[in-house]
Image (tube, rainbow, N blue to C red):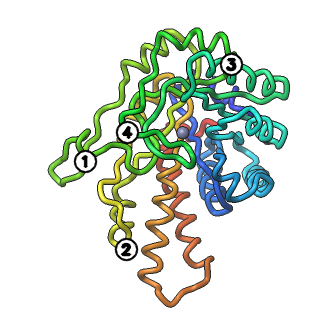
Amino acid sequence: MALVTTTEMFKKAYDGGYAVGAFNVNNMEIVQGITEAAGELKSPVILQVSKGARAYANHTYLVKLVEAAIIENPEIPIALHLDHGDTFELCKSCIDGGFTSVMIDASSKSFEDNIALTKQVVEYAHAHGVVVEAELGTLEGVEDEVVVEAGKASYTRPEEVEEFVTRTGCDSLAIAIGTSHGAYKFRPEQCTRNADGILVPPPLRFDVLEEVSKRLPGFPIVLHGSSSVPQEFVKMVNTYGGNMPDAIGIPEKELRHAAELSVCKINIDSDIRLAMTGNIRKYFAEHPEHFDPRQYLKPARQAVKDMVAHKIVNVLGSAGKA
Ligand SMILES: [Zn+2]
């Protein structure tokens, strides 16, 4: 199967009550870990590249790694998506350079400016067979160059979504219902603590999601900042010399529920970073004499694969849907 857009994926996901995982890729081991899991579980998958990933690994390297993954996993649909494009030029460069989907994130601009920029990207993308994700509302947190200070975030206003989608012609919409970028999604004062002293975050605003869905029947919704920050990885990082106190994510049960509703794409990045870092730290601690990168990247890649497999089966519900 060649690289595909997300159109068919999202239609099936919407009707089937599941979501497709969108995992951020930065290097070969991450691409392999994700696509090996998706391939074995016969799951559709979205590989997404941020502006920062493109600056780190180079556009051509990333596209060629994804092309290799398609050759190695011919039975599953794979989409290549730009995560958080912030200018028309960046989106155009990815559309011209082989991506099948782009996000234009103009959510920090005014409603009218967001519409104008999104519409410009949609017109160019659609003329080239590429689909566009847009965003209304802003998430808290840090992701590459996207930094939104605590308290500056705002939930999506459902009364704006129909006009926005109609006027821009976007193909999917990222909304803000309380998810957040990064490994510290909530400040301790926003949370309660359970009996083990682990932070319990405030619940997602499913009322906002439901209101949006009512106004946009059949339209695919996207959740950013949806890592669950598994405490086993946080513990691994902290046990082997790291320092990540109170790292916290979105409970998987809530993401599973969102996937059953209109959410067709769930973005996961921090969990990949945590799986790799935890396992590399552990490996170094247990094998201080080793210096071959293959030795410590192998368990890191396996950890990404196991984590993605877990998400596909237990959170996204996309196993067997290729
Ligand atoms: Zn995001």
Q: CA distance from mark 2 to mark 3?
A: 49 Å
Determine which residue is flagged by label 4: 150
In the rendered image, residue 276, in percent from the top left (x then y), is placed at 51, 64
Q: Using a 10 Å C-alpha cutoff, classify the residue at mark 4 as few (fewer than 14 neighbours), some (14 to 19) or many (20 or more).
A: few
Give neighbour class at mark 1: few <14, some 14-19, many 20+ (Cα, 10 Å). Answer: many
Q: Quick one: 149 or 308, which is closer to the camera?
A: 149
The quadrant of the rendered image in which ligand 1 is seen is top right
Res. 116 mark: 3
Disc 1: which residue? 199
Front residue (pair 113, 258): 113
| Residue located farthest toward the left when viewing the structure as drawn | 195
Q: Nearer the viewer, residue 256 or 249?
A: 249
Helix, strand or loop at disc 1? Answer: strand
Q: Secondary structure at mark 2?
A: loop
Q: Are marks 2 and 1 in contact (CB under 8 Å)?
A: no
- For label 2, the crowd category at 10 Å Cα-Cα, with few meaning under 14, some 14 to 19 and many 20 or more, is some
- For the point 58% across and 71% down, the residue is 298
Q: Nearer the viewer, residue 317 or 210?
A: 210
User: Could you tell me the amino acid type at mark 2?
Assistant: Tyr
The mark found on residue 240 in the picture is: 2
Location of residue 297 in the rendering, given as x and y in whole percent from the top left corner:
58, 71
